[in-house]
Image (cartoon, rainbow, N blue to C red):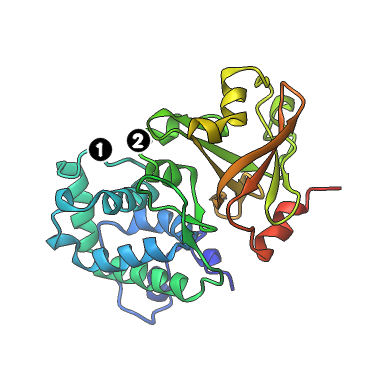
Amino acid sequence: MDVRTIYAIFNFARLCAEAGVRDDFAEPVEDVLTKAFSRLCAIDSRRWIGFLLDILPRLDDVDFTALGENEKRMLNMFYVTVWQEVIEDFSADAVLERLYALADSPVMLGELIELLKYKLDTIDFIDAPADLPYDCPLDVHCAYTRDQLLLALDFMKPKTLREGVKWLADKQTDVLLITLNKSDKEYSPTTMYNDYSINSRLFHWQSQSTTSADSPTGQRYINHKSRGSHVLLFVRETKSDACGAAPYTFLGTADYVRHTGSRPMNIVWQLHQEIPAKFLRKTQQVMG
């Protein structure tokens, strides 16, 4: 059974209580965590899980303002996953109240920790830190939601992003959020892009319909290496899965190879790391 099927409606501890195989309980974070568990099931980064398994059992004894920058990013990624809000001030009363409420909920916290341990034990691929000149907690071939990955890159207003591309000027980084299988119901004709992997290293991507080869954005894509900017590819099969918005798999950094056309541009990117076979089958299936 996919563990997410349990969390589509209930948490496991509540199911056990309803079945009479454990004592009933009442905890302040049960409702919010029950809704968050299906999103937490997607976490598969060894580094991020390791951080959470270290900090969660001692939440009531942590100076959050003293955390390292990457630790703050990973805590913010967790916070937005659970509470759907961003931490702007790690000493804010509302933030501390929520984190301490989790610390004061031993049943829910225990289930969260067990879920993370289970996820860690079932990871079946090799991840690696992204090849970037700045600190970032994203690991290649791990899955992240839009909000999680943008917070990892210090974009603090992820919910304002309405498109599949984001230029982060402070990091000189283009973020490409790619959905492979698009349905007419969810996308307009101008966003029915043609995206797929050509092989384990090359990925064909179609830009937004308004992007021309001679535009500032098009030139940035073409000349990113000489300009010192970076391109990150995040890919998912569909917009939604059984548990809601589907997460993206981080394919890592990529270099421009060639392009054809304009408005939109059809660009071939060469990935710095090969797409694993389990992902390659998914990214190639829309071809033909």
Please name the residue shown 43% across and 34% down the image. Answer: 159
Q: Which residue is mark 1?
A: 88
Identify the residue at horizontal 73%, vertical 39% (top origin). 183
Evaluate if marks 1 and 2 touch, with contact meaning CB atoms under 8 Å apart.
Answer: yes
Toward the viewer: 146 or 245?
146
- Dot 1 crowding, Cα within 10 Å, few <14, some 14–19, many 20+: few
Determine crowd level at label 2: few under 14, some 14-19, many 20+ residues with C-alpha closer than 10 A: some
Q: Which mark is residue 156?
A: 2
Q: Secondary structure at mark 1?
A: loop
Q: Secondary structure at mark 2?
A: loop
Name the quarter where the N terminus is drawn. bottom right
Residue 239 picture quarter:
top right
Instruction: Name the foreground residue: 134 vs 23.
Output: 134
Q: Residue 230 at x, y = what percent?
A: 50, 38
Farthest residue to the front: give it: 226
* Quarter-of-image position of residue 269: top right
Amino acid tagged 2 = Met
User: In screen coordinates, is 30 left or right of 10?
Assistant: left
Q: Position of residue 105 (x, y in %)?
A: 24, 64
User: Does 51 sit above or below residue 81?
Assistant: below
